[in-house]
Amino acid sequence: MEHIQKRKKKAQGYIEGKGLRALPHNIGYDFKKNKLIYLMSLPIVIWFIIFCYVPMGGILMAFEKYSPVKGIIGSDWVGFGNFRAFFQGPYFLRLMKNTVVLGVLDLIVGFPAPIIFALLLNEITTKKFKKTVQTISYMPYFISSVVLCGLITDFCASGGVLSNLVAGVTNSGGRNLLGISSYFRPIFVLSNLWQGLGYGSIIYIASLSSVDQELYEAAVMDGANRIKQTIHITLPGIAPTIIIMLILRISTLLQVSSDKILLLYNPSIYKTADVINTYVYREGLQNYNYGLSSAVGLFNSLIATALLLITNKISAKCSDTSLF
């Protein structure tokens, strides 16, 4: 009798500490408990299935000599032939080098800048001035990449603002900066910084508001100045947010902004500007080599997944913060 009562009691709520054995019961109980929420999430789940998971069937093209006439099912199977063609191709080392260098430079410059900007904004006490600075810093993010790249192209052209500025500093002629391979990386990284600085700081500003103000009051009473308060209270307070954002940023290390590169680069600067995603675009949409393009894209996605898992594992071991 007591055994039956215990089973009934378990069936009325979540079962804890039983691992996978309790999973079906917990899912069923949770569904009954939150029917309305599950119903509301149904359109989002359907959207993901249709637009994110169904297209994943296209991965098969990476292992085929794809022909639009024969389709995915009827195309000739080549196994890892497309991958071998990419790894043994003449552009593999150049693509990997450019992608890693651009990704790392963008990470080094673009990741800490929003954190520093948010800390500086947090120190501004005049509310109206703070709001004005925030609004101005957010605006570049909402400019279309096409418009932004058009502006950069005009500024970097012969006689443009940036071209003349560089010519004055280096005492050289006002040449088209986008025609010189050594200038592409700084132009790309700095334009990303300008466009994403304000928008990227939003999450850190929100995180700063959650830091306990009593800690600052106690620090003031102990004689701590603003720098010490930032080091010992502010940064530890937003550390979980910084770690999560760093994990997400590292996972996209090889997913550099290919749309912006496609709009800015030209064959004369392929030496430093050509990356994996632009190669995928050229092979897929210009050369109609869909199989090779899919293989390269799949390779890039696998590297991104591996980076995410590795950084998440390291973070979980070194701190209490991780994505999963």
Image: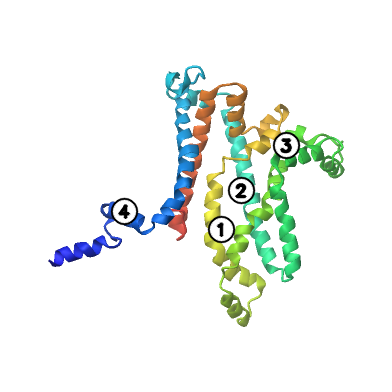
N-term-proximal mark, 1 vs 3: 3
Q: Who's the residue at 42% across and 22% down the image?
A: 73
Q: Between residue 222 and residue 188, name the one nearer to us.
A: 188
Please give the residue where the numbered disc 2 appears in the rendered image. 107
N-term-proximal mark, 4 vs 2: 4
N-term-proximal mark, 3 vs 4: 4
Q: Who's the residue at 76% across and 32% down the image?
A: 179
N-term-proximal mark, 2 vs 1: 2
Left or right of 213? Residue 50 is left
Which residue type carries mark 1?
Ile
Please give the residue where the numbered disc 4 appears in the rendered image. 28
Please tell me whether residue 107 is drawn above or below residue 297 in the rendered image.
below
Q: Between residue 177 and residue 209, name the one nearer to us.
A: 209
* Dot label at residue 242: 1
Which residue type carries mark 4?
Gly
- Secondary structure of the residue carrying tag 4 is helix
Please give the residue where the numbered disc 3 appears in the rendered image. 182
Front disc: 2 or 1: 1
- Secondary structure of the residue carrying tag 2 is helix
Give the alpha-carbon distance from disc 1 to disc 3, as whole Å. Answer: 32 Å
Left or right of 30? Residue 110 is right
The picture quadrant where one finds residue 208 is bottom right
> Is any part of residue 205 visible from this angle?
yes
Instruction: Classify mark 1: residues with Cα within 10 Å, few (<14), some (14-19) or many (20+).
Output: some
- Secondary structure of the residue carrying tag 3 is helix
Front disc: 3 or 4: 4
Which residue type carries mark 3?
Ser
Give the alpha-carbon distance from disc 4 to disc 1, as whole Å. Answer: 36 Å
Instruction: Classify mark 3: residues with Cα within 10 Å, few (<14), some (14-19) or many (20+).
Output: some
Please tell me whether residue 286 is drawn above or below residue 5 in the rendered image.
above
